[in-house]
Amino acid sequence: MTTTPASPGTPVGGSWEELVTVALLGTERRSLQGQRPGQQAPVALLDAAAVETVRRRAGVRPARAAARPEPAAPDGRTPLPPAAARRLSTLLADRPGTGGGGRRGAAPDLVELLPQWLALANARGFAAPPQALPALLDAARGRTDLRPAALAFAGPRALWLAGLNPEWRFALRSSPGGATTPPEKAEDVQRLWQEGLFAERVALLGAVRAKDPAAGRALLVATWATERAEDRLMFLDSLRSGLCAEDEAFLEGALADRSRNVRATAAELLSALPGSALAARMADRAASCVALDHTRETPAITVEAPHECDAAMERDGVVPKPPARRGERSWWLGQLVEAAPLRTWVARLGGRSPEEVVALPVADGWQGELHAAWCRAAVRQRDPAWSRALLGPPSAPEAGGPGAVSLAERAKLLATLSPGERADWVAGFIGTHGLSEAFQLLGVCAVPWAGSLGRAVVDALDIARDAGSFPWSFSGVMGLAERCLDPAEAARLEGLTSVPDESEHAAPGSGDYWAEAFQRLVTTLRLRATMSAELTAP
């Protein structure tokens, strides 16, 4: 085998990715870069992998000698307690996909507990141990869902490391100028806004906007005319944070933008401001299409959908061309109603409350279209009274309220309610309809689940277990329960960890599976309680 001597500063075997490629293809099919003459290829590969592993764990890429970097900024947060530091190492050492097949056994899923551990550590103000930073950055690199919490926990030292290792550059792009807050000096903010990379500018705008909405808007106004259309769209989206009446003038100007997507986003933001001029225009248009017919024995809503989409409607964000298999007039009507302030209907329909409006019959088959648009409006305007009316009672037939057209829509409506009301509604839904339809709704409930919701989930699982149901049908809910149940529920679940007697209608082996699943649930809840106790400063 012909070998190429390694140049000074070049690791034998090249990068970690190259070593993995050689290992997968085999040393007989792929030569190893920089292998020493006379050394056996498999031995050289293992030696190179061992050296590269040490380099990766050190957190710095090998390179030619250069000036020593400046020290990392100090992290003044409380050091992590030793027991919690050991727990973090265990959680980071676990990797997705290491389980054997579909059956998980009774051991907790550590991969799914890492986000919760990070949230607790951040809430309690702990700093990450320096030796854990490389593994923490690797975990955040592989899982975008972990990045916000992982980078907040990692602090300034991780950003210092990210400047030295290209594999971790995502950490620099995740926050403005490599910081979780905007620069303190106004000139530094302006310099970063004018000269930074696009990702840095997006992050900077979001950070400034969260701290001072007017200052964020001023940044955007200063360069708006020179930005690319796709960049304007991303920047405009940052106005969702702290959206206020003072943003209206800028957004009205964006309605004349060259980009259709920018115009649509500006119109959506304006319609979320019930006092805006656009909201008033949409209210006038929508009200002209919907009226109350008193000539019937029972008052009913009548609908006359628009006959055209004129230029003024298009400027205000109405999309003229409907999706496939959707009528033009119903498409235009839905957009008008969705963008109109919900208070429009209380005045238009005889001063009725949201519950009374939603209960009114709708003539000529327009009820589904009208109620679906009201659902979208309630979500956009974050209106709990209308959300409550459209959801209806959780015991409603077919698991749907008067306006909820799908589980996804109900989940969005629930998100506008307070955490306690949300939990009680979903608990009532599960009590009436069981768990099969509830998975999407459970995802919007606050963690840990309130007592009423936790009891409803456990009772429904117990009922499914006693009925001999297919246990794997509830694996998703069981996984949620492991992460979301209050750890205090562990003692109450002890009685469910034994193998139940299987009825003649039960799925074969279901008793063993259910016992194993409940054992894992109890073990996980106790582990979460231990994790919480470890994350307590001495």
Image (spheres, helix red, strand yellow):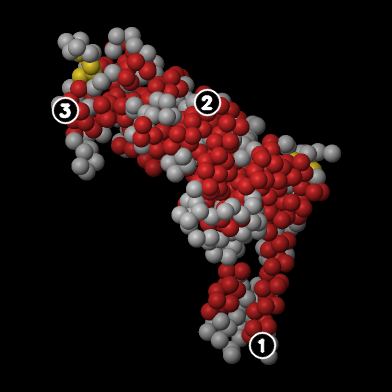
Tell me, yes or no, whether the two marked residues, 1 and 3, touch with CB atoms within 8 Å.
no
- Quick one: which residue is furthest to the front in this view? 504
- Give whichever of 239, 271 is nearer the camera: 271
- The residue lying at 64 percent from left, 56 percent from top is 106
With 1 as the anchor, is 54 left or right in this view? right
Is 17 placed above or below 124 here? below
Give percent across and percent down for residue 205. Answer: 52, 35
- The residue lying at 50 percent from left, 51 percent from top is 468
| Visible residue check, residue 390 | yes
Q: CA distance from mark 2 to mark 1?
A: 68 Å
Give the mark nearest the N terminus, 2 or 1.
1
- Give whichever of 24, 89 is nearer the camera: 89
Q: Secondary structure at mark 3?
A: loop
Looking at the rendered structure, the number of numbered marks drawn on it comes to 3
Residue to which mark 3 is pinned: 308
Tell me, yes or no, whether the two marked residues, 3 and 2, touch with CB atoms within 8 Å.
no
Circle 2 or circle 1, nearest the eye? 2
Is 23 placed above or below 357 here? below
Tell me, yes or no, whether the two marked residues, 2 and 1, touch with CB atoms within 8 Å.
no
Give the mark nearest the N terminus, 1 or 3.
1
- Give whichever of 96, 140 is nearer the camera: 96
With 188 as the anchor, is 379 left or right in this view? left
Q: Callout 2, which amino acid?
A: Glu
Residue to which mark 1 is pinned: 40
Residue to which mark 2 is pinned: 421
